[in-house]
Image: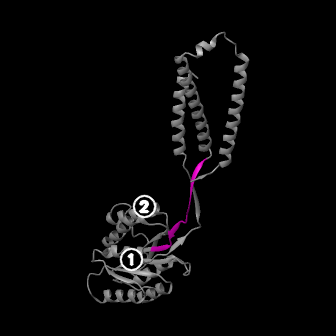
Amino acid sequence: MALGMWWLTAGLILAAAVVGVVAWIRSRRARSQHARPIANSHRLTRIPGYRRALKRSSLQASLALVTLSVLVVLAAIGSGRWIYQRVEQPEKFNRDIVLCLDVSGSMVDYDVQVIQRYLEMLPGFQGERISLVLWDATAVPVFPLTDDYDFVNDQLKLVADSMESYGSVGSEYFAGTRNSGGASLVGDGLASCALMFGETTDDGRSRSIIFATDNAVNGDALMSLPEAAALTKERKITVYGLDANEFEDAFADEYRVQIEQNGGKYFKLSDESSISAIVDDITSEQTSIIRGAPIVLITDRPAGWLIAILGVLVGYLVLAWRLKL
């Protein structure tokens, strides 16, 4: 704890001392000027009751003077702004995450699970940037990388509600994702999500794509899955592949091999723990910390002095009432 305005405290104490001395001198002069001698007053002052009353009055007056002095000193010290100082270095996680969801008909229920899990995780994020891309025949960014979590929360809820209420007015969550022939063009979808991070790869930020699909390609893509997976490796992006295909067939085998060969991790969506495992993996491993400039935090702590002033003030008022001051 430190005194933030020590000069104010010193000035107030000095001023109070000067005022007290001047008042005492003037009081003595006034008493001497108005004093009138009384004959035989020495007999009165010898009475025991008078002596006791005079002694009690003098003691109370002295106590009142001491109390007033303490009150002035406490008020001066308290007004000097007592503060606590501490130095903090803010930290943020420089983690970028793109939710890259296949919105073909067979994927909607799985997409809702992924979105809901991330809605649960949002309150714990600090500095992470999140983006959402929906894709089928074409990819549509719903929102770019941002750490505005209120905005992210609202957008994820809108998309999840739209998926769950498909068929009602305003529920076309897939708008813009079917503007060309084909469906579930996995290579194009993954490549589009990789481009959401921009061209720079050496800025110290970790990059992750949560990629959900069943790899059931229908049509001619501009980029194949192996080409897109190689692109993510080249750009130092970790892909977490969620496979909605419940069968161990060629589609599932190709998906797993391409994800793992290029530094990603493969999960089956039929495993209920997959989404939680991905989230835990990202939050524990795919992170680096940005340390900001040290900040000096100053906190005013006047409470103790105010309580002391209040207590002494009450004592002084009681004494002043008894002395009829």
Front-most of residues 43 and 254: 43
Residue 104, position in %: x, y?
A: 35, 75
Front-most of residues 292 and 9: 9
Instruction: Give the magenta range.
Output: 81-97
Q: Nearer the viewer, mark 2 or mark 1?
A: 1
- Residue 17 is a magenta residue: no
Front-most of residues 184 and 284: 284
Q: CA distance from mark 2 to mark 1?
A: 25 Å
Q: Main secondary structure of the magenta part?
A: strand
Front-most of residues 322 and 262: 322
Q: Which mark is on residue 281?
A: 1
Residue drawn where x is 54% and y is 34% of the image: 313
Q: Which mark is on residue 206?
A: none
- Please indicate, yes or no, whether residue 126 appears anywhere in the rendered image: yes
Q: Which mark is on residue 154?
A: 2
Residue 165, position in %: x, y?
A: 32, 63
Residue 76, position in %: x, y?
A: 62, 41
Mark 2: which amino acid? Asp
The kind of secondary structure element at disc 1 is helix
Residue drawn where x is 36% and y is 89% of the image: 257
- How many residues crowd around disc 2 within 10 Å: few (fewer than 14), some, or many (20 or more)? few
In the image, residue 4 above or below residue 102 = above
The kind of secondary structure element at disc 2 is helix
